[in-house]
Amino acid sequence: MISNSESDFSVFSCTQCGGELHPDEGQLFLSCPYCNSTVYLDKSKVVFHWYLSSTLNGEQAAASLSRWMAGNSTVKDLDKKSKILGQTFQYFPLWFFKVKNGDIEKIYLEPAAATSVTELRSLSLPAGDLRKFDDSIISQSIEPTVPLTAALEWLGSKQIDQAKITESALVHIPVYTFKYGYKNNMYTALVEAGTGKTIANIFPAKAEAPYMAAGCAASFVFMCLAGIFAVFLTMNNGASTGLGAMICVGGGVVAAPLLFAFASWVASKV
């Protein structure tokens, strides 16, 4: 990433070869005429510009969403009880930072445009899957609205030393956005079309109370059995201790399948 003097904002330096770039007024994306690198202009800064190629079509993305809905994170049968209300495809921009701390190298992502799904920053973008930004996908790309300085401030808030950033780039990722309805509420989920990962901040999640009830019931039963054994143990004779042990073991044998059945019933309903 290279900055120019404040007196000349019309000439930039390529991040790859150092060649002078002369963009037209308002131009954000361009290719270096010397080394053919694709770059993005952010005020007086130049960064590499990549995109992640899409491997899913709309039908495959919808299938990925359905598998996520049928998983363990969402309410039971969300894939069957919800209704898809809309589907769109776009390339969404992310700020890409490679940070090296000693021998450890880590990638950080920050949204480069407004989005309600901030979990996009948890994506994994292998460097080998990135491609030079292609002008042919500009019409499907969301223009960045979050400046690089703001993204760097976010990194600073995470106690990340900017001096250790070895690479900065703008990456457009292919995303299918799904709007779906469930019980008179509308939700948004994204399917990243490079890997098929489904991302959502807010969704109909499994209720925790029934599972907590099952756990509390199991804890109460076995604490009672342990208390019974402790009472017999205080009688301080072998016969009482043996009787207490038998009651505890017998009670556990009877209670265990009942508690397991209750937990299975909860899992089937929630």
Image: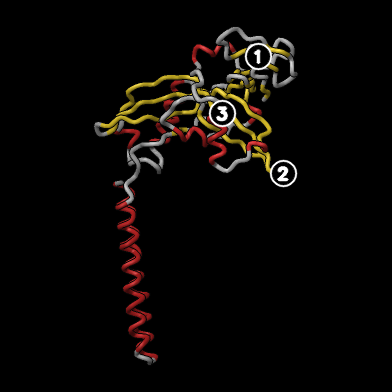
Relative image position of residue 67 (x, y in whole percent): 42, 34
Query: Closer to the N terminus: mark 2 or mark 1?
Result: 1
Question: Residue 73: which quarter of the image?
Answer: top left
Q: Which residue is mark 3?
A: 149
Label 1 crowd bin: few (<14), some (14–19), many (20+), radius 10 Å: few
Q: CA separation, marks 1 and 3? A: 19 Å
Whether label 2 touches label 3, CB < 8 Å = no
Q: Which residue is mark 2?
A: 103
Give the residue type that dot 2 points to: Asp
Relative image position of residue 26 (x, y in whole percent): 55, 10
Residue 8 shows which numbered tag?
1
Instruction: Report the side of 228 relative to 28 (left or right).
Output: left
Relative image position of residue 172 (x, y in whole percent): 55, 22
Q: Residue furthest bottom?
A: 237
Label 1 or label 3, whichever lies nearer to me, is: 1
Q: Residue at x 30, y 53 (%)?
A: 210
Question: Residue 258: which quarter of the image?
Answer: bottom left
Q: CA separation, marks 2 and 3? A: 26 Å
